[in-house]
Image (cartoon, helix red, strand yellow):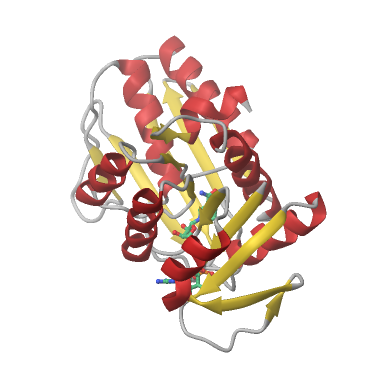
Amino acid sequence: MRVGVTGATGRMGREILAEASERGVDVAFAVNRGDGHGDVAGVDVEPADDFPDLLAERAPDVVVDFTGPVSSVEYVRACADAGVPVVVGTTGFSDAQLDELQSYGDDAPVLVGANFSRGIQALRQAVQSAVGSLPEYDVEVTETHHNRKRDAPSGTAKVLLDAVDDARNRDAERVHGREGDQPREEGEIGVHARRAGDVTGEHEVLLAGNDEVLELTHRAGSRGVFAAGALDAAEWLTTADAGFYRFTEVAARL
Ligand code: NAD
């Protein structure tokens, strides 16, 4: 597999390049916005403006993107035009942006994942099972990330909220923090986003009934778990037909 990497000097881009090097995966090119980035994990990082040319000239088997929502949509559009599979780890997309990404699945395999760790996939299943067994319990979701994260709540928190809705077969009202005179309404889900220090990512789903509390928690110890999952997904995507895929749907097949 030869991979193209965007956002190569970002926190996740660096992890992807390090993981690729560890696995012996060839890097066709790596880009980041701006220029003069130098070397990351033995790969020369080139200016993002060169992306369309690099895509055509170096013909990667797959592109892995961890940047920001606006640039991600542009990269996926370019990959779809070129028929190159693309794994998107970026989070914080609007519904309209997600619809646009989905439409590019008509032209190339496009896989989107808000969290590529295996533990989060297991947490998602555990949440569905717990909520299914405890349908009347109050649910609150809390996530904690480093102080430079932009989007809130995290894409992973949204995946967990969707898991709760799926288990209950309805869309709960999501209350983002509470302030003032704001008693809890039956069935709502409180969502809490904390930003502090260099926390890689923590997610907790709390279920509470009368006299008992169940807490399901995941803590990522390093970004390496996300990079490993993203490259597993990339390998799988090189064998997939054009289409729009979510990591939650394909994780079990990797
Ligand atoms: P970061 O800010 O450290 O890195 C983003 C990088 O993308 C930066 O180097 C930035 O310069 C670059 N960039 C932005 N626009 C660009 C463009 N147009 N062309 C090329 N490069 C561009 O952020 P991060 O911590 O690496 O996270 C990136 C994204 O990945 C965020 O949306 C984050 O929430 C998400 N993320 C997802 C997972 C997952 O498992 N799916 C895990 C961690 C982070």
Image side of residue 179 versus residue 53, left or right: left
Image side of residue 48 versus residue 45, left or right: left
Residue that extends furthest to the bottom in the rendered view of this protein: 36
Image position of 186 with respect to 196: above or below: above
In the figure, residue 117 lies in which quadrant? top right
Residue that extends furthest to the top in the rendered view of this protein: 133
In the figure, residue 137 lies in which quadrant? top left
Q: Residue at x 49, y 35 (%)?
A: 247
Inspect this view and state whether residue 75 appears. Answer: yes
Image position of 54 with respect to 39: above or below: above
Image position of 112 with respect to 213: above or below: below
Image side of residue 187 versus residue 90, left or right: left
Q: Nearer the viewer, residue 174 or 208?
A: 174
Q: Nearer the viewer, residue 130 or 107?
A: 107
Q: The C terminus lies in which quarter of the figure? A: top right
Q: Residue at x 24, y 47 (%)?
A: 100
- How many numbered dots are placed on residues in this image? 0
* Image spot of residue 105 (x, y percent): 34, 38
* Image spot of residue 169 (x, y percent): 28, 16
* Image spot of residue 21 (x, y percent): 78, 59
Image side of residue 10 versus residue 241, left or right: right
Image position of 99 with respect to 168: above or below: below
Q: Residue at x 65, y 39 (%)?
A: 232
Residue that extends furthest to the front in the rendered view of this protein: 57
Inspect this view and state whether residue 195 appears. Answer: no
Q: Nearer the viewer, residue 60 or 229?
A: 60
* Image spot of residue 240 (x, y percent): 51, 30
Q: Residue at x 40, y 27 (%)?
A: 163
